[in-house]
Image (cartoon, rainbow, N blue to C red):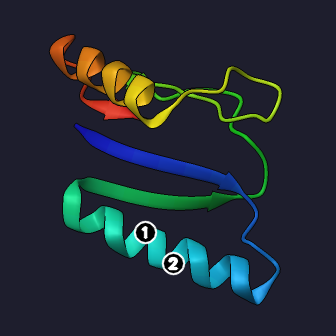
Amino acid sequence: MKWNLLTVGKPALDYARLGADEYLRRLQRQTDFTWTVVKSLPTAKPAGHFWIVLDERGTQLTTAALRQKVDAWELAAVKQLT
């Protein structure tokens, strides 16, 4: 499964930018992963992408619960996770 991370704007603080760069480096060793910075969220979603929105007002998942969801998406043959 290909992972696509979209963020609105780059981290402004040095420590946040360095942390994001380190996390991206680690993820790229594990999976096909890209990070794209956009000025605003796209209004049209590309076809074939399964979209997840991370928001502090959303449901909090443990690592194990997230892993179960990822496993289910892989079994459902999700090719692009954004």
State the count of labels: 2
Q: Determine the secondary structure under disc 1.
A: helix
Across and down, in percent, residue 73 comes to 29, 18
**Pointer 2: residues within 10 angstroms few (<14), some, or many (20+)?**
few
The location of residue 44, given as percent across then percent down, is 63, 26
Residue at image position (47%, 29%) is 46
Rounded to the nearest angstrom, the CA distance separating label 1 from label 2 is 5 Å
Asked whether residue 12 is in view, the answer is: yes
Q: Amino acid at mark 1?
A: Leu
| Quadrant where the image shows the N terminus | top left
- Say above or below: 18 vs 23: below
In this view, the residue in front, 36 or 18, is 18
Foreground pick, 42 / 51 = 51
Q: Quadrant of residue 74?
A: top left
**Farthest top residue in view:** 76
The one of 41 and 52 positioned closer to us in this rendering: 52
- Residue at the spot 48% in from the left edge and 60% down from the top edge: 35
For label 1, the crowd category at 10 Å Cα-Cα, with few meaning under 14, some 14 to 19 and many 20 or more, is: some
Residue beneath the point at 71% across and 76% down: 16
**Residue 40: % across, % down:** 78, 48
Between 42 and 57, the one nearer to me in the picture: 57
Label placed on residue 24: 1
Specify whether 64 is left or right of 29: right
Give the residue at x 83% y 26%: 57
Name the kind of residue labelled 2 in the image.
Asp
In this view of the protein, can residue 48 be seen by the observer? no
Q: Residue 5, relative to residue 11: is it above or below?
A: above
The residue under label 2 is 21
Asked whether, in this view, residue 70 is left or right of residue 16, the answer is left
Q: Residue 9 at x, y = what percent?
A: 76, 63
Say if mark 1 contacts mark 2, CB within 8 Å.
yes
